[in-house]
Image (spheres, grey):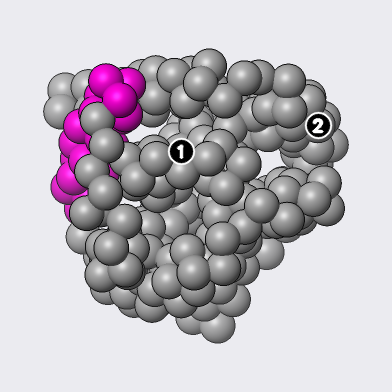
Amino acid sequence: MDLAIAALIVAGAALVRGATGFGFAIIAAPGLAFLWPTNLATSMVLVLDMIATAMIIRSGALKHLRIDDALLICCSALLGVVLGVMVIKDLPPETARLGLDLTVLVSAVAALLKFRAPVLGHWSVAIIVGILVGAMIGAFAIGGTLLLAWLMATDRDPKEMRALLTLAFGFSDTFSVILRVALGLFPLSALTHAALLAPVMILGIMVGSLAFHRLPAELWRKGVAVLLIFIAGLSLVHTIFYA
């Protein structure tokens, strides 16, 4: 029964990831954590997200990548992953999630209202965003919403956003798994569970990717902003009232 529920959660999360370039971890991790211990659930999510990233890269998403964004975000995200695995993991998850959700919620509302802040595109801001995203992924297997909110605030093209999200997730997820294994924090059962759930995730990614290539850019932006608000708002309610 648990596996069937997990399959539904993973399929839905994969559909969102394929269509938007983000959302797999932030949807799948909380859902799977209701079924299994948090460390097992987040380790499974990291492995599945690595598979999803490989699929999206294979589809040619990286041909739209901006090299300057990639270098700044990925290098700073790796530093963030170290902080997340070594330090931030010991902080109360509710505190970290509250800060993330508030930041994403404000950013998503601003994006929906078409507020643009060119100053946010400065390289120093990109480094800070990369560190925060990497730290959240390293500690709790979530954080991509913050990167997407920043990309939308700096008015990037949807294909550029998806390309950078794909690369950043690939780097952060892989490095997080390596660190967890090195520190003895990665349960081997995560590989078995991930293997069982991989087929439904692959199907979800494929269907979502088809939707991405058929949606007009402006409709995509609005849809992603609404989804960000929904996810952050729902998480805020859970953190404040049920944590």
For label 2, the residue is 206
Query: Along the line of sight, which residue is nearer the eye, 12 or 148?
Result: 148
Q: Quadrant of the N terminus?
A: top right
Q: Nearer the viewer, mark 2 or mark 1?
A: 2
Residue 170 seen:
yes
Does the magenta-highlighted stretch encompass residue 108? yes
Query: Along the line of sight, which residue is nearer the eye, 151 or 46?
Result: 151
Question: Looking at this rendering, what residue extends furthest in the bottom direction?
Answer: 182
Residue at (20%, 32%) from the top-left corner? 106
Is tag 2's residue or tag 1's residue first in the polypeptide sequence? 1
- Disc 2 to disc 1, C-alpha distance: 19 Å
Q: Quadrant of the C terminus?
A: top left
Residue at (37%, 58%) from the top-left corner? 133
Q: On screen, 74 above or below 216? A: below
Left or right: where 9 falls relative to 155:
right
Left or right: where 177 falls relative to 27:
right
Left or right: where 166 falls relative to 38:
right
* Residue 14 percent across, percent down from the top left: 66, 33
Checking the image for residue 26, the label placed there is: 1
Residue at (59%, 76%) from the top-left corner? 178
Q: Residues within 10 Å of mark 1 (few under 14, many from 20)?
A: many
Magenta span: chief secondary structure = helix
Say which element carries label 1: helix
Quarter of image, res 228: top left
Does the magenta-highlighted stretch encompass residue 161? no
- Asked if labels 1 and 2 touch by Cβ distance under 8 angstroms, the answer is no
* Residue 175 percent across, percent down from the top left: 56, 73
**The magenta segment:** 92-114
Residue 177 seen:
no
